[in-house]
Every structure is written in C-alpha cells, then in structure tokens.
Amino acid sequence: MTGNYNSSENNSGRQTAYTVSAVADYLKASLESDPRLADLTVVGEVSGYRKPSSGHHYFALRDEQSILRCVMFRSGRGGQFLADGTQVICRGRISMYTSRGDLQFYVDQVEPDGIGALQQAYEEMRKRLEIEGLFELDRKRAIPELPARIAVITSPTGAVIQDIINVLTRRYPLAEIILIPTSVQGEKAAPEIVQAFRALNTFDDIDVVIVARGGGSLEDLWAFNEESVARAIFASNVPVVSAIGHETDTTLADYVADRRAPTPSAAAEIVAPDVRDLGGYVSGYAVRIDEIISRSIRDSRSQFELAVDRMNRKIPDTTMPRQRIDDLLTRARLAGQRLVESSKQRLATVEASLNALGPAKILGRGYTIARRTDGSVATSATQFSTGDKLGVTFADGTVKTTVDEVASTSKSIDS
C-alpha cells in the first residue's frame, strides 16, 4: 500500500500506520480495478430516495438482507422510475466516496423490474397485428403536400406540442393547427388516444394528423403499444404521422402509422412544406412559364412568316397583266374616241344631206306645197274642184286661195 503515513517503522518493530486518506484511496482503487464491479447490474427495492436541486438522484437499493447506497447523476437514464418502494434494475459500477468513506453504487441506467414481460407482450402483439395486415406498406397513404388543417394528438403541456407549433409556424404559417389533447402516459393514455382518433374521424376538413410524445422507457411509451391505439390509428380517415419517443424507440403506433418521424419536430417538418421552398418553386415556375410563352410567341411568329412566304409564292404575278390591261384600256379609249369622231362626221354628212333634201330647201328653190282645208298635202290637181279653198306653202310662209279652174297637166312642162 502506498500513501501518506504518520511515521516510519520504529526500532521496536511496530507496523507502519497509514492515513485515513491513504486507506480510502486504496479501497477505491481496489474496487474500481475489479472488472466484476466495473459493470454491474443489481436488482432491488428503492429506499430513501431524494432528488435535490442539483438534479442528481440519491437512494439505496435493498432486499430482505442487505442495503447498498446508490447515486445516479442527472445525466443518467431512467430517473423517472425511482421512487420509494419500487422494484428496479440498476446498471453501473461500485466505487467509494472517499470524502465520507462510503461504498457506493454509481448508477448509469435504471429500468423497472419486469421489462422482460413488457417486451415479450410487445413482440407477441406486433407479430399478431403484422399477420392481420395492419403494417402493410401498400395501405399507407401519402402525406398531402399543402395541408390546410393539421391535427395534433398529444399532451397539451410540455415541450412536444410547443416544438410542433414552433416548427409549423415557422415553416408553413398558412396551415391551421388543431390540438386534440390527451394523456400520453399512464392508464388513461390509451383510452384517451383512442377517443381522440374517434373524434378526429368526425371532422371532414382535417388533412393530416400527428400523434406524438417525448422520449421515455418502454413503460412510459406503453400506451402507444396498446392494441386499441394501433387499431385506432389504422382506422383513421386521414394520414397519420407518428413521432413517439426518440429515434431509437419504436412502438406499434409507428408500424401502423402512414409515416414515422424520429422526433416531434421532424414530424412537423414532414407534414408541412417550407414556405421559402414554395417561394423558390413559384419563382422557378414563373420563369419557366415566361420562357414557354416567349418560345411559343417566337414559334408562332416564325410559322406565320413562313405561311406568308408560302402564300406569296402561290399568288400569281399580276404586274404584266395589269400593264396589258392598262394598254388595252388606253387603246380602247382611243378607239372609242375615234369611233365617236367618225360617227359625228357621218352624222353631220347625213344631216347635211337630209337638210339638203328637206322641204325647206326645196321650197327655197321655188317649189310650193298645196294643202287642203283639212291640212293634208295635196298630191294631185284632181283633188281640187273649182271654188275649193287651199293653202299654198312657200319657203317663207303660207297663202290661202280659192281654185278658179282645174287644168290638166298631163303634158310635159317643156312642151
């Protein structure tokens, strides 16, 4: 043994005396060097439990014959199972608290005694429900991309609901959150969760539901291993996202749910898109739509121009025919003018001839016209008798006279 001592061996041959600290340190080192005591599991009843403000746990494990002082620092797991009179299984190491000289069991993890029975019951129920088809992947429903109303089945107090609300509010404030409060641990938990799903099925405007609670032991999470809860999730009218315990915890609710999340916050991220991502998608789609419209306009313009070119190529050349038409019209107009002039000349000639042959011209040469009293022109002397009245028309007027004698003019004028 090494350590402090009060005096060396004297001449009388007495044994060296060690200090209390030296002895305590030796015992501590001896205990901690024993591999059987370095990782030890102990079953016993909790006694004298206390938890000061430091968060550490102080208690004793006892059975019918012995007692073992224990301490579990606040970093240990399973402190919720510690209470006077409870039967627990503790895992840790044996050492000595040298300041008081106390031999202590330094506990790292606590579980309730009987965990094996719970695990066995869990496995049996899991296999039975699996055979019935409650875990089939084909029946699992897709989570809606843009939910309007999100239901949450969990405890109304604690960090879980706050984490979910914070994430949903940050990521997707457009959705309405409907809390259906239930117990999540203890005897009342399973019936309340089942009733919550029954109430949920009466709503017709819920898009998705999250069922969640924080981490804990198998006993803490046991409500979510109850057959009634598994069947209630299976019968849900809307997709279910489960977030039970930590990522390493798996319950029957997780198997039945349409989607499992490792944490409540992750469940909120699964059911709600990020509005920032949606904004990016909308901007991207707007750019694509603008490109599509611009491309469509360019293509339509090109097709129109090609159609115009094809139409122009099919239209006959009218330049030469138009010139020929203009020449023909000019020639026709000139021919018409010439025809009119020629007709005028012929008409003038005919008019002159007619005038020359007209009664006025003849009368002007000394001839006269005899008219009977009825106005008719006399053409023969025999048409008159002595005493008849007649009118004689000269070129410059008419003379009325009476027939004195009718003489025959059968002889020639020359005779």
Image: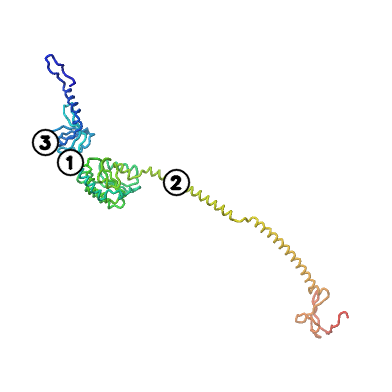
Q: Please provide percent x and percent y for residue 21.
A: 17, 23
**Disc 3 versus disc 2: distance between alpha carbons?**
79 Å
- Whole-angstrom CA distance, mark 1 to mark 3, is 19 Å
Q: Is residue 293 left or right of residue 71?
A: right
In the rendered image, the vertical position of residue 351 relative to residue 120, given as above or below: below
Residue 404 image offset from top left, x and y in percent: 83, 84
Determine whether, in the image, residue 116 is placed left or right of residue 162: left
- Report the side of 168 relative to 45 (left or right): right
Q: In which quarter of the image is the N terminus?
A: top left
Quarter residue 158 falls in: top left
| Secondary structure of residue under mark 1 | loop
Closer-to-camera residue (163/228): 228
Tag nearer the camera, 1 or 2: 1
Few, some or many residues within 10 Å of mark 1 (<14, 14–19, 20+): few
Which amino acid, mark 3?
Glu
Residue drawn at x 76%, y 67% is 346
Identify the element where label 3 is drawn.
loop
> Pointer 3 and pointer 2: residues touching (CB < 8 Å)?
no
The amino acid sitting under disc 1 is Gly
Q: Which of marks 1 and 2 is nearer the N terminus?
A: 1
Residue 36's place in the image compared with 369, above or below, is: above
Q: Which labelled disc corresponds to residue 114?
A: 1
Q: Position of residue 237 (x, y in %)?
A: 29, 51
Mark toward the start of the polypeptide (3 vs 2): 3
**Which sits earlier in the primary sequence, circle 1 or circle 3?**
3
**Where residue 190 sits: x, y (%)?**
22, 47
Label ID, residue 64: 3
Residue ID for mark 2: 288
Where residue 37 sits, quadrant-wise, is: top left
- Mark 2 lies on a secondary structure that is helix
Whether 35 is drawn above or below 392: the answer is: above
**How far apart are the two marked residues, 1 and 2, measured between alpha carbons?**
63 Å
